[in-house]
């Protein structure tokens, strides 16, 4: 049965959960036998962290199993979806309700979570049903009561820490389901919190696949308006419901059906759920209108000083009503000449087709220092159904020092032609900012979203989502005071990583863009070579400890490139200590985004207070197929610093 027909049957049948449970209940067991201290339930309840995993087939996972997947993961337990109400060792398939339940996101969520919570055991309550619409999780349903029963059992030995939600495809089949989805989701969160006795329980919502309903997905393209509705509901959830977080599906792939995430993407998705859990917080963000905006690196189309001015982006002149985080999805823009902004340059067939056209750069000043979580943009309609000139891809840079430096950045894109509506582009973390620099990298036509034109870059209105902050706003480049290595080999001296011997100058926040490193054996660190590939499983992941001059709030690892060869370190696990390395209390994973050559990149992460960092390298450019494939038989680093605040 095709997926669309399968969803139709499930969405229109009210008896399938009971029928299916009855048919399979006697065939499925609670899981493989297990023993040993790695799967003991901690005697201290506070060390046993329990999570619910709800949703449909992308929550349970349908990617094929591989060798080793059925081996249990140490310090991770589960209550079986179907079977005895008891804890058992957790392995794939984590869910055991359907024969299609295979490799899922849950165990990689647990692995990532334990990196930042050392010493805990994770308990998982997998309750997803392949093909289930959200109505099957409504209070009073068999599924909902199953969740509450299992949570009550789990809380006898552990602490409920959150709920993961990966669902939505079945609610795009009919308009009535999509229209009711947001209210159903908010109600589900409220009910779960009330009935588990956890009023502030973190809830992490994952986005349906970015490939679902894409232009190359003709089977589900007719559902695109409903798919967009659900994308917007997930993206704006943190701005509407406290203690919630959003997980983007950007850059993830599918198994060939444009519906289900593939194995590599499920690993990443699980990690993203764990990372997002840390951002679920009580602050309820508001819509922030910049107090002023200016234009750099481009020219605006100007008709006697009254049309197409950049000031139109923040004056609300074309909006149907005042925009807030709760109504942004319904507020439209009229896109008349007198209330939009456009570039002067006109190049066919597309603005970016001419190297003479600069990427427009807009600098927005915020009313107060704020934690920024999202950019909101309205489509440029040009008086019609939607223009290909509408700005669609943005490099967003953040300054906390009144626009003097912009050390942190993120790139976001619209997912479709917006016409007169808005889209909230959620960032993967919050950023402290007094000023925000927005570079327009592409328009809707350039991204293949459609629409007429494409020869200019245009915008109708611009807002940000966030909340005021009292944090110290002064960033600096932090040079470690010492470094040591306890795992792995060293052919070149480790001290070269922090002694600036190959830098053109000691870096500052304002000078990072022009900072470079000269590659030479006398000024870099590298392991001994191990051909053909260092990371083939036979060599240890190098680990080193860096001590900082004093405790700082860290937000980024600054890494210089290793000359463009494949030995360059690309993947890092960072652990943080506030007591000089006596104990390590949190952990994050960061990766380079491209081959750096001799330049540097700031690999950002959520703020953490520390005076020591333990860094494990677990990838190089050859492993990640980044840049040149020359080398790769060792792993090397040119120079590192940290970005932080007092």
Image: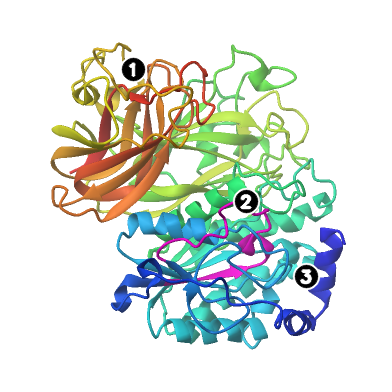
Residue at figure coordinates x 75%, y 44% from the top left:
214
Disc with the residue nearer the chain's start (1 vs 2): 2
| Residue 348 in the image: above or below residue 174 | above
* Mark 3 surroundings: few (<14), some (14-19) or many (≥20) residues within 10 A: few
Which quadrant, please, contains the N terminus? Answer: bottom right
Q: In terms of image quadrants, where is residue 326?
A: bottom right
Magenta segment, prevailing SS (helix, strand or loop) = loop
Residue at figure coordinates x 39%, y 86% from the top left:
156
Q: Whole-percent x and y of residue 559?
A: 34, 28
Query: In this figure, which residue is indicated by the disc labeled 1?
Result: 514
Query: In this figure, which residue is indicated by the disc labeled 2?
Result: 66
Left or right position of 83 against 577: right
Element assignment for label 2: loop
Circles 2, 3 touching at the beta carbon (< 8 Å): no
Q: How is the image coloured?
A: rainbow
* CA separation in Å, label 2 and label 3: 39 Å
Residue at figure coordinates x 42%, y 22% from the top left:
567
Q: In front of the other: label 2 or label 3?
A: 2
- The front one of 591 and 176 is 591
Disc with the residue nearer the chain's start (3 vs 1): 3
- The front one of 502 and 248 is 502
Q: Whole-percent x and y of residue 623?
A: 50, 30
Q: Which residues are magenta?
A: 50-75
Element assignment for label 3: helix
* CA separation in Å, label 3 and label 1: 54 Å
Left or right position of 340 against 435: right
Query: In this figure, which residue is indicated by the disc labeled 3?
Result: 176
Q: Is residue 279 visible?
A: no
Which quadrant, please, contains the C terminus? Answer: top left
Q: Whole-percent x and y of residue 504?
A: 26, 13
């Amino acid at each position: 049965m095709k997926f669309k027909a399968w969803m139709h049957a499930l969405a229109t049948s009210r008896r399938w959960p009971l029928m299916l449970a009855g048919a399979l209940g006697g065939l499925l067991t609670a899981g493989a036998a297990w023993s040993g201290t790695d799967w003991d339930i901690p005697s201290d309840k506070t060390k046993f962290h329990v999570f619910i995993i709800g949703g449909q087939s992308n929550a349970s996972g349908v990617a094929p199993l591989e060798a080793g997947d059925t081996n249990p993961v140490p310090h991770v337990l589960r209550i079986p979806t179907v079977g005895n109400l008891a804890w058992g060792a957790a392995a794939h398939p984590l869910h055991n309700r359907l024969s299609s339940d295979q490799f899922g996101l849950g165990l990689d969520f647990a692995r990532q979570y334990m990196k930042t919570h050392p010493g805990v055991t994770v308990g998982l309550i997998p309750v997803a049903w392949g093909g289930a619409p959200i109505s099957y999780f409504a209070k009073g349903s068999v599924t909902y009561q199953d969740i509450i029963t299992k949570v009550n059992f789990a809380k006898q030995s552990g602490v409920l820490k959150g709920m993961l939600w990966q669902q939505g495809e079945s609610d795009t089949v009919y308009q009535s389901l999509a229209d009711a989805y947001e209210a159903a989701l908010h109600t589900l969160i409220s009910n779960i919190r009330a009935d588990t006795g956890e009023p502030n329980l973190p809830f992490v919502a994952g986005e349906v696949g970015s490939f679902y309903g894409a232009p190359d997905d003709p089977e589900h393209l007719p559902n695109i308006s409903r798919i967009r509705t659900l994308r917007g509901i997930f993206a704006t959830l943190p701005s509407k419901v406290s203690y919630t977080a959003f997980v983007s599906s950007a850059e993830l792939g599918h198994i060939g059906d444009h519906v289900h995430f593939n194995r590599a993407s499920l690993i990443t998705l699980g990690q993203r759920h764990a990372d997002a859990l840390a951002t679920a917080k009580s602050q309820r963000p508001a819509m922030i209108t910049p107090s002023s905006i200016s234009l750099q690196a481009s020219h605006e189309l100007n008709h006697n000083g009254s049309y197409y001015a950049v000031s139109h982006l923040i004056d609300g002149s074309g909006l149907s009503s005042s925009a807030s985080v709760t109504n942004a999805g319904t507020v439209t823009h009229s896109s008349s000449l007198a209330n939009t902004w456009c570039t002067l340059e006109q190049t066919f067939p597309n603005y970016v087709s001419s190297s003479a056209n600069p990427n427009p750069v807009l600098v927005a000043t915020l009313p107060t220092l704020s934690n920024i979580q999202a950019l909101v943009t309205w489509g440029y309609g040009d008086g019609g159904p939607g223009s290909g000139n509408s700005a669609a891809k943005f490099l967003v840079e953040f300054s906390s020092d009144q626009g003097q430096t912009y050390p942190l950045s993120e790139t976001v894109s619209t997912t479709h032609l917006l016409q007169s509506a808005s889209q909230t582009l959620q960032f993967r973390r919050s950023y402290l900012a007094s000023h925000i620099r927005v570079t327009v990298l592409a328009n809707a036509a350039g991204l293949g979203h459609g629409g007429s034109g494409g020869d200019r870059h245009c915008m109708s209105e611009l807002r940000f989502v966030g909340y005021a902050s009292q944090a110290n706003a002064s960033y600096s480049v932090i040079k470690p005071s010492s470094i040591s290595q306890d795992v792995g080999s060293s052919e070149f001296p480790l001290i070269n990583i922090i002694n600036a011997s190959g830098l053109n100058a000691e870096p500052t926040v304002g000078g990072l863009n022009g900072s470079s490193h000269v590659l030479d054996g006398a000024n870099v660190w590298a392991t001994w070579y191990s051909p053909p590939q260092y990371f083939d499983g036979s060599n240890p992941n190098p680990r080193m400890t860096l001590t900082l001059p004093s405790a700082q709030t860290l937000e980024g690892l600054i890494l210089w490139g290793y000359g463009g060869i494949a030995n360059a370190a690309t993947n890092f696990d960072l652990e943080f200590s506030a007591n000089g390395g006596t104990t390590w209390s949190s952990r994050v994973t960061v990766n380079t985004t491209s081959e750096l050559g001799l330049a540097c990149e700031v690999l950002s992460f959520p703020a953490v207070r520390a005076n020591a960092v333990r860094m494990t390298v677990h990838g190089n450019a050859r492993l990640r197929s980044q840049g040149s494939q020359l080398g790769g038989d060792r792993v090397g680093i040119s120079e590192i610093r940290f970005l932080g605040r007092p």
